[in-house]
Image (tube, rainbow, N blue to C red):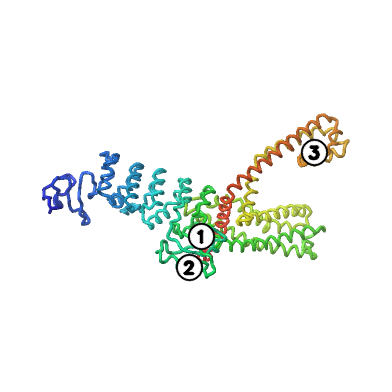
Amino acid sequence: MAVDGNAKTRSVRGWHLDAGRLLAVSPDGRRIACAADRDLFVVWQPEAAEGCIPDYYSLKMSHAIEDRACMDKILQAFGPALFNYPNLMGMSLFLHAILDDNVDCVSMMIRWALKEDVKVSMFTYPVQGTERTNGLQMAINRRSPAIVRLLVNALLGGLTTEQVMVDVFQKSLLNLGEVYPSLLMEVIGDDRMLQSIGEMQCPEHIFHKDRFFTGTSDKYWPPDFGLAKLWEELSPQTRADRNTVMLPAVAKVIPYPHIAQIGGNGILRPLLVNDVPPRTFSSKTLQCVISYKWENHARQLLYDEIWHYAMLLALFTGYTIILGFEREEWSSIRDVADGSLGVSAIAFLVGTCLLAVANLVRECKQIKVSRSDGKIRGFNGFMVWLRSKWNMWEWSSYISIIVIIPIVHLTSFLEDLRVHESWLVAVTSIMLWWKMLYYSSAFRPTGPLVIMIFEIIKDISVFIFTAFAILFGFGIAFFVVFRHDVEENEDVSSQFGSVDRALFTTFGMMLGEFDIQLFYTTKLPFVSLALFVVYMMAMMIVLLNLLIAIMGDTYDRVKNVEEVAFLRSRASVIDDIESMLSESAKRKLE
């Protein structure tokens, strides 16, 4: 049987060929066509391992893969087949080049495919004993950042069809962040992640609050004639009357399915868990996700939580105020609930406990969700939960309200416990009010201010250590210098009569609270005055001005990245709220 008009039937013998299945040989003997297993028709040639498509490793051994001119001829001869036809291993020549970490070959093939507008199948063909994967995941596993960057840019540049790009990003984008966080930032920050699907005229008023008008749809790439209908489905706000000012708006989609899903199924939680740099959240892609979640459900959920927490705070504050007016001595547990103040205190405390129990249950649910996500995605969910500065703060305050304070209050007829109740309630009250900063961080007017507070606290931590080291040293020095005058001078005794008094007096001196005449009355006036002058120069002139400079520098730094820090903070609050939702609430929102 002849392959073409010039071919002749010949007899061929070889170690790997079964002559009984031989069909034909080309006139020059360079091509052999034969029947193979599974009713396939196979054509053999010198560079091929199977079929007429060259084999990557055969080309590599013959050094043809390194010859640019030779590769150009092979690309022109075989074209798309080199990218899309799998061999017996289920991989194309292009995927073999990725697996071999051949940057030059991958780069050359990508350039040719983009130039010739050849669409590439990035996935392997599933064969027995192997799992289906894609070229980007292979490069990530191979730890080849150069090829990863080439593939990502090519995917965004149109190397594959839209659906293939979606599938590749869905399976490998978060894995990219675990291995190469900087590359993930490049991908998410790339404007091409927002794929344009058309343009239409929209009412100007829908962009008053935000530069993005976001929504979700089950249609990834609608046709041009269906774009207006899609926008109307997203929100009736897109409809306009005669008096409405219209603007041209570009409709874009993010090639990542379920990117705005709740919890670990979306993209926010994996990014927060991996602790990606804050500037990642300033990308247009994540701004759209954050904006959608905030407008769709997060803001209302946060309002509900604030209302619930405000009730708890009001009840506990009422209990604290009543406790402050309760100054009678109690002799038994009956006296605790005696009188109008006692009954009111018990009522406020019970109400606070009930609300705190409800909040604690939600916190336990959050831990469960975090651990569950951790088992699925390979991280320690409990440690991630502990990483938040607010979680342990909440747990401590709720345990105090539910367990410790009620026990201490009911046994406060004992004198020692009555005293301990006072400081315990005071500390818990501060912790509860401090939590209001958490809720404030999600709103644009107050969020940057809260971020500024915490950044300043973090930046001055070293300064505080230095200041207290100097303060402690001078405090001990003043205590020793004034020890000869403690018994003779009552003012010296009250201010420097003990180590703790000397330290607190020294701290007050830093704030301007001191009596200069006291330093003349000591038996060592020269020493005490010299210490006073050196201390005041060190603290008032040097360190306090340094503190102002540090705070000013922090303010300028945070102000420059205010939007980035705020978006990261809002994303964290959104994820925190979503992690406490019940399964039924999640299904309803999704």
Picture coordinates of residue 87, whole percent (x, y): 27, 50
Crowd class of label 3 (few under 14; some 14 to 19; many from 20; radius 10 Å): some
What residue occupies the far right of the structure in this picture? 488
Picture coordinates of residue 14, whole percent (x, y): 16, 45
Q: In terms of secondary structure, where does tag 2 sit? A: helix
Mark-to-mark CA distance, 3 and 2:
76 Å
Whether residue 380 is visible: no
Q: Could you tell whether 82 is left or right of 289 in the image?
A: left
Q: Could you tell whether 128 is left or right of 544 in the image?
A: left
Q: Which quadrant is the N terminus positioned in?
A: bottom left
Whether residue 530 is visible: yes
Q: Which residue is mark 1?
A: 262
Quadrant assignment, res 314: bottom right
Quadrant assignment, res 439: bottom right
Q: Are marks 1 and 2 in contact (CB under 8 Å)?
A: no
| Residue appearing at x 42%, y 61% in the figure | 220
| Foreground label between 3 and 2 | 2
Position of residue 348 relative to residue 422, above or below, is below
Upstream in the sequence, badge 1 or badge 2? 2
Q: In terms of secondary structure, where does tag 1 sit? A: loop
Mark-to-mark CA distance, 3 and 1:
58 Å
Q: Which residue is mark 3?
A: 498
Q: Which residue is mark 2?
A: 232
Q: Could you tell whether 357 is left or right of 124 in the image?
A: right
Upstream in the sequence, badge 3 or badge 1? 1
- Type of residue at label 1? Ile
- Type of residue at label 3? Ser
